[in-house]
Amino acid sequence: MKIFKKKKYSILSNILKYSFVFVFAFILIIPKVWALGGVESGPGGQVGGGPGGQVGSETGSANITGIKNTITNPLGKNIDSIPKFIEAVINIVLIVGIPIVVLAIIYTGFLFVKAQGNPEEISKAKNALMYTLIGAALLLGAFVIANAIGKTVDEIKSSA
């Protein structure tokens, strides 16, 4: 039974060691598969082109019919500049970070109750509360600073 356990864990460790290869391969292959999905074949299985398999049109452009030549923004239509992207990232960080801060404060309250007067445990709880409040201040400070810089840049743009 011990041999099976050792083999099981060695197989799992090998899978974990080489999992980056699979991830890297998928990162390289998936865009190519999506790109091939947009190709439409013409009569006789030829892709795009006119008679005789010529590519292009009368104007001489290198457009292959059936292939989309536009890039859509994966972040959405509203995010079209770096300041808007930074604002979206900060909003996501706030949406995720504020509940984590609340849970950390609740946990530090639990640590104070669990300490029951033990000076060593109380000092651990105080440190946990201090680090939680520092994290909350950094989180909210990043939001305030980013908004202040964004509004300053907008005012400079409008006055210029």
Image (tube, rainbow, N blue to C red):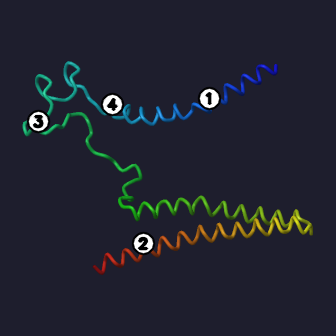
Q: Specify which label sits upstream in the sequence, 1 or 3.
A: 1
Q: Position of residue 61 (x, y in %)?
A: 13, 39
Label 1 vs label 3, nearer the camera: 1
State how far apart marks 4 and 2 are (Cα): 41 Å
Label 1 vs label 2, nearer the camera: 1
Q: Is residue 115 left or right of residue 148?
A: right
What amino acid is found at the position of numbered circle 1 in the picture?
A: Ile
State how far apart marks 1 and 2 are (Cα): 46 Å
Q: Which residue is tagged 1?
A: 15
What amino acid is found at the position of numbered circle 3 in the picture?
A: Ser
Q: Which residue is tagged 2?
A: 150
Q: Specify which label sits upstream in the sequence, 2 or 3.
A: 3
The C terminus lies in which quarter of the figure?
A: bottom left
Q: Is residue 27 left or right of residue 115?
A: left
Q: Are marks 2 and 3 in contact (CB under 8 Å)?
A: no
Q: Position of residue 136 (x, y in %)?
A: 64, 68
Q: Which residue is tagged 3?
A: 57
State how far apart marks 1 and 3 are (Cα): 51 Å
| Mark 2, other Cα within 10 Å: few <14 / some 14–19 / many ≥20 | some
Residue at image position (73%, 66%) is 105
Q: Specify which label sits upstream in the sequence, 1 or 4.
A: 1
Q: Position of residue 53 (x, y in %)?
A: 15, 24
Label 2 vs label 3, nearer the camera: 2
Question: Looking at the picture, does residue 103 appear above or below residue 117?
Answer: above
Q: Specify which label sits upstream in the sequence, 1 or 2.
A: 1
Which structural element holds mark 4?
helix
Question: Looking at the picture, does residue 91 appear above or below residue 14?
Answer: below
